[in-house]
Amino acid sequence: MKTLDLFSLGTQSDVAASAPLAERMRPRTIAEYVGQSHLLAEGSLLRRSIEEDKLFSMIFWGPPGSGKTTLARILANETKSHFTSFSAVLSGVKEIRAVIEDARELWESKKKKTILFVDEIHRFNKAQQDAFLPHVESGLITLIGATTENPSF
């Protein structure tokens, strides 16, 4: 029988096995993702951009639990990109600079793209926007924002 020490780090399989059911059942590929067929159907713009590894920045809008974060993770997985998650509410310019530096190092050392997922992007302030903009425009990062607020207003 295997005993676990409270203070030792478990193996990856131990951690995965103890993850909440929702996390263990989360879709990991486009084939497992249910819904949004108008976005992910064969021949659709998003599907072609994934297949051609030419993903673009985008904003996902929907209620909590509708799959915005999951879809962003799937896009990173399908394009073999590094996925970084960021909260517009909890993180500031200092954290943005660290994310940008990590993305730059990954690109220069491994030619690996970075997808930056920004949760609650509608809460971004001007300083945060200004820190990101040149790096999104240059293509260093692909920005995927998620919001529960209608971006049309």
Image: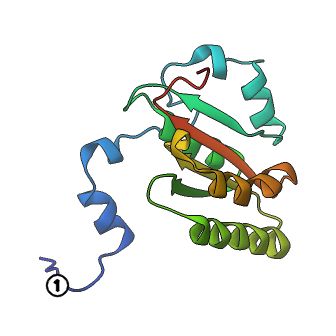
Left or right, residue 11 beside residue 77: left
Residue at (30%, 41%) from the top-left corner?
22
In the orientation shown, which residue stands out farthest toward the top? Answer: 38
Q: How is the image coloured?
A: rainbow
Secondary-structure class at tag 1: loop
Most foreground residue, 131 or 42:
131
Above-or-below relation of 23 to 65 = below
Look at the image and tell me in which quarter the C terminus lies.
top right
Does residue 20 appear anywhere in the picture?
yes
Most foreground residue, 98 or 38:
98
Residue at (73%, 27%) from the top-left corner?
46
In the orientation shown, which residue stands out farthest toward the front? Answer: 126
Above-or-below relation of 30 to 152 = below
Q: Position of residue 28 (x, y in %)?
A: 51, 42
Numbered disc total = 1
Left or right, residue 97 beside residue 139: left
Which image quadrant is residue 9 in?
A: bottom left
Above-or-below relation of 131 to 4 = above
Left or right, residue 103 beside residue 17: right
Label 1 crowding class (10 Å Cα cut-off): few <14, some 14-19, many 20+? few
Does residue 71 appear anywhere in the picture?
no
| Residue named by callout 1 | 5
Look at the image and tell me in which quarter the N terminus lies.
bottom left
Q: Position of residue 89 (x, y in %)?
A: 45, 53
Above-or-below relation of 109 to 61 = below
Q: Position of residue 8 (x, y in %)?
A: 25, 85
In the orientation shown, which residue stands out farthest toward the right? Answer: 138
Q: Position of residue 91 (x, y in %)?
A: 50, 62
Residue at (47%, 25%) from the top-left corner?
62
Residue at (42%, 27%) from the top-left corner?
66
Q: What's under tag 1, amino acid-wise?
A: Asp
